[in-house]
Amino acid sequence: MKILALITARGGTKRLPGKNIRLLGGKPLISWSIDAAKNILDICDILISTDDPSIMAVCNDAGAYVPWLRPKELASDNVSSVEVAIHALNWYESEKGKVDGIMLLQPTSPFRTKESIRRGIEIFTLNNYRPVIGVSPVSDHPSWTMRIEDGFLKPYLADHGLHSRSQDLPSAYSINGCFYLITPNELRSTKSFFGVEAVPLFVESPEESLDIDTYWDWRIAECILLGANDLGKTFKKD
């Protein structure tokens, strides 16, 4: 198995400026994802796609592979992660040879573990190389969500469960952003990390599921580091 781990990181983040190299627990945010992908047998390289020389320098120091800066046309807000991934994949396979899978590890998921990465690769293999997506239980069930119509609250779903107990509702999961794995052919043909039939990598830990997008998310990450003895520990709820 030969899997390319890709970490994408733009320099011009707006909600939390400079977040990709901002220090979390004493090391740049992006370094957490680089370290998680190191020394995993099936990963052939940890490739960074960035448009920012500062991010490039940090990633080089962290031991990742940063052979170029991303072209300007792939560095704007409206460019999708799929476009960036296909650009990186095409370059890598032309220079280094074919890979069996491309794994997207977003730098905004710092508490993703090596165990989860290995488990995702195992699921990929056991399911005949179908796409694997990291998911977590939702905090707010979609059956209890609302929309506003003409100034009044209306159930978002026609078959809502507003009068059901939470334990009676079917399980629901959200994409947590910590793990994507797909074959190169399917990524190119579908232009999506979900492919045709994606299978789940269940991530129960709320720490691993954290996706840092705002300052509030960053504060949560800092609290996790202050309150946990190790990253595998889940906080007990009263």
Image: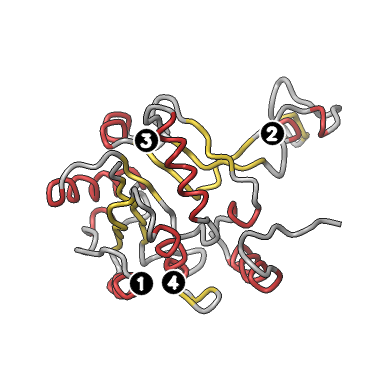
Q: Could you tell me how far apart the alpha carbons at marks 4 and 3 are, in whole angstroms?
A: 27 Å
Tell me which amino acid carries mark 4: Gly
- Indicate which disc, 2 or 4, sits on the residue closer to the N terminus: 4
- Indicate which disc, 4 or 3, sits on the residue closer to the N terminus: 4
Could you tell whether 112 is left or right of 147 in the image?
left
- Indicate which disc, 1 or 3, sits on the residue closer to the N terminus: 1
- Indicate which disc, 1 or 4, sits on the residue closer to the N terminus: 4
Residue 85 appears at what percent x and percent y?
A: 30, 47
Residue beneath disc 1: 62
Residue beneath disc 3: 192
- Indicate which disc, 2 or 1, sits on the residue closer to the N terminus: 1
Disc 1 residue crowd, few under 14, some 14–19, many 20+, Cα 10 Å: some
**Residue 126 is drawn in which quadrant?**
top left
Residue at image coords 26%, 32%: 185
Residue beneath disc 4: 18
Tell me which amino acid carries mark 1: Ala
When the figure is inspected, residue 121 is found, relative to residue 52, above or below; the finding is above
Residue at image coords 48%, 39%: 133
Residue 226 appears at what percent x and percent y?
A: 68, 74
Residue beneath disc 2: 142
Disc 2 residue crowd, few under 14, some 14–19, many 20+, Cα 10 Å: some
Q: Could you tell me how far apart the alpha carbons at marks 2 and 3 are, in whole angstroms?
A: 24 Å
SS category of the residue bearing label 2: helix
SS category of the residue bearing label 1: loop
Q: Could you tell me how far apart the alpha carbons at marks 2 and 4 are, in whole angstroms?
A: 33 Å
| 129 and 51: which is toward the camera | 129
| 230 and 55: which is toward the camera | 230
- Indicate which disc, 2 or 3, sits on the residue closer to the N terminus: 2
Give yes or no for contact between labels 4 and 3 (Cβ–Cβ under 8 Å).
no
Residue at image coords 28%, 44%: 2
Of tags 1 and 3, the one toward the viewer is: 1
Could you tell whether 73 is left or right of 205 in the image?
left
